[in-house]
Image (cartoon, rainbow, N blue to C red):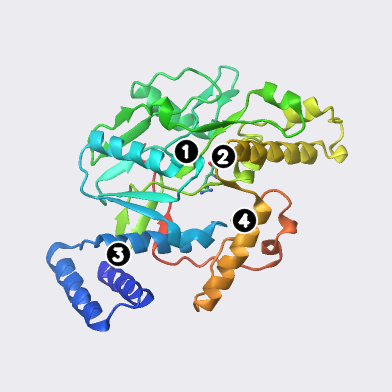
Amino acid sequence: MPMLNEAFDFIKLYYTENNLPIDQLEKRLKEVERDIMEYGHYTHTSDELAYGAKVAWRNSNKCIGRLFWQSLQVKDQRAITDEETIYEKLLEHIEFATNNGKIRPTISIFEPEKVRIWNHQLIRYAGYEQEDGSVIGDSDSLTFTKKCIELGWQGEGGQFDVLPLVIQIEDRQPRLFDIPQEYVKEVPLLHPEFDWFADLQLKWYAVPMISSMKLEVGGIAYAAAPFNGWYMGTEIGARNLADEHRYNLLPVVAEKMGLNMSSSSSLWQDRALVELNAAVLYSFKEDGVSIVDHHTAAQQFKRFEANEESANRDVTGNWTWLIPPLSPATTHIFRKPYDNTKKSPIYSYQKTPY
Ligand code: ARG
């Protein structure tokens, strides 16, 4: 009985790490066993669920921001069963997490096995393929954007159109909801020295809220459990806006900087990258939106590693994700091996529903 084993492991972890009395643990294990035998599943208490979501963050091998795992704000939304109310709760999540820029790491957890949110992130930009094969907007959103259009959404065809929320309950027809503008905090990008940077009219949204992953706790899979932290600058400046298959802005920035783009040994790509990343960090700070640079994030990760060691726990990690995409060798992470073993509770990928 796999669920029983996983349930027992998690309940034990919860009681042990929180120093709860052993007789209560035994009572809870009996109850969980009885529920699984009788119904094939059991129900987490709100406290168990909240702790499970936090430990799943602690176990996120790809995440450099894990120092703050205990501060996760957990919204238990398991009682909600209709699309409209889920939509309202998602808007609440966006508002609470955004907090006018002082971002709060937050997760909203919906009923397991029932609810799916089709979006990859609650707020993300659409991508439209042009006839010549080029893309306007975020090419990472191409397939999902098409789906939204099929379901009746009308995109404006711009570089930064916020996609609608798509919510599905069981095998019902998915429903689309627009996110009102006032919920979408965005940061226009400026550069601390280059005045021309503003003319590029770039921006990015304030809060990355992953909504496509499932949270697994003690044998129960929460398929709809959108969560967020705040951005590390390089996610935007060295990937989303820089990758050739995303916004591909290095040539644009290099050109404006007047760099010699005829030879890669002029390091025009590297120089453009640095300035693009400087613009991201500068603009978020100017606007009072939480963000962390990769050097600070690596230092915080070092503290996380030390904390875990004190608690006698092994830190697992995925080196290829933990190193920042900009100047990785300036961080201690670059020179350390990491064991990528997966531990439960865990956030993991799941099949796209479309
Ligand atoms: N890399 C993703 C993006 O650029 C976001 C992933 C989660 N990031 C975070 N800082 N919590 O949109």
In-front residue for pair 331/213 = 331
Q: Name the residue that disc number 2 marks.
A: 288
Three-letter amino acid code at the position of disc 4 = Ala
| Residue labelled with disc 1 | 100
Q: Marks 1 and 2: in contact by CB < 8 Å?
A: yes
* Sooner in the amino-acid sequence: mark 4 or mark 3: 3
As drawn, the label of residue 48 is 3
Visible in this render: residue 29?
Answer: yes
Q: Secondary structure at mark 3?
A: helix
Query: Could you say which is closer to the camera, residue 148 or residue 194?
Result: 194
Q: Which mark is residue 297?
A: 4
State the SS at label 4. Answer: helix
Between marks 2 and 4, how big is the CA–CA gap?
18 Å
Q: Is residue 219 visible?
A: no
Label located before the other in sequence (2 or 4): 2
* Figure label count: 4
**Sequence-first tag of 2 and 3:** 3
Left or right, residue 65 beside residue 74: right
The vertical placement of 270 against 215, above or below, is above
The residue nearer to you, when weighing 214 against 66, is: 66
Task: Tell me: is circle 3 under 8 Å from ligand 1.
Answer: no
Q: CA distance from mark 1 to mark 4?
A: 22 Å
Q: Position of residue 263 (x, y in %)?
A: 87, 34
Image quadrant occupied by the N terminus = bottom left
* Vertical placement of residue 63 versus 132, above or below: below
Q: Is residue 13 left or right of residue 293?
A: left
- Check disc 3 and give the amino acid type: Glu
Q: Secondary structure at mark 1?
A: helix
Q: Looking at the picture, which amino acid does disc 1 mark?
A: Asn
In the displayed structure image, the side of residue 173 where residue 287 appears, left or right: right
Quarter where residue 241 is shown: top right
